[in-house]
Image: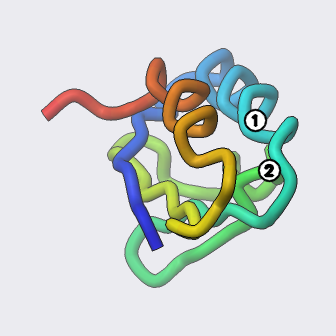
Amino acid sequence: MKSYMLDLNSIDRVKGFVKAIEVFDGYFDLATGRYVIDAKSIMGIFSMDLSKPVEFRVPEVHEKLPEIEKAIAPYIAQA
């Protein structure tokens, strides 16, 4: 599993992220603490605490990993 910390602290960022990730086949998770939801679920994302970065998890064996990384690049949290 490969993970990235994302900053989804606005409605526009959440909508943009879901639109970017929903074109890819497979299952992706977003996690904060012990809470894990489907990354393609806009309602699930809005149920999370988005004031802090959330962890986006992708299976490392996903054949489109480079494309996924490019799609989520605008949402990666800055350290």
Q: Position of residue 25 (x, y in %)?
A: 86, 53
Q: Position of residue 30 (x, y in %)?
A: 57, 61
Three-letter amino acid code at the position of disc 1: Val
Three-letter amino acid code at the position of disc 2: Lys
Residue at left offset 53%, top offset 26%: 70
Q: Position of residue 69 (x, y in %)?
A: 50, 36
Which of 38/28 is in front? Answer: 28
Q: Is residue 16 above or below residue 55?
A: above
Q: Is residue 2 above or below residue 17?
A: below
Mark seen at residue 73: none
Does residue 65 appear left or right of residue 5 in this picture? right
Residue at left offset 45%, top offset 83%: 34
Mark seen at residue 18: 1
Quadrant housing residue 72: top right
Q: Is residue 58 above or below residue 72?
A: below
Distance from the alpha carbon under mark 2 to that under mark 1: 6 Å
Q: Which residue is mark 2?
A: 40
Q: Quadrant of the C terminus?
A: top left
- The reply to whether discs 2 and 1 touch (Cβ–Cβ < 8 Å) is yes
Residue at left offset 62%, top offset 33%: 67
Kindly give the residue lying farthest to the left in the view shown: 79
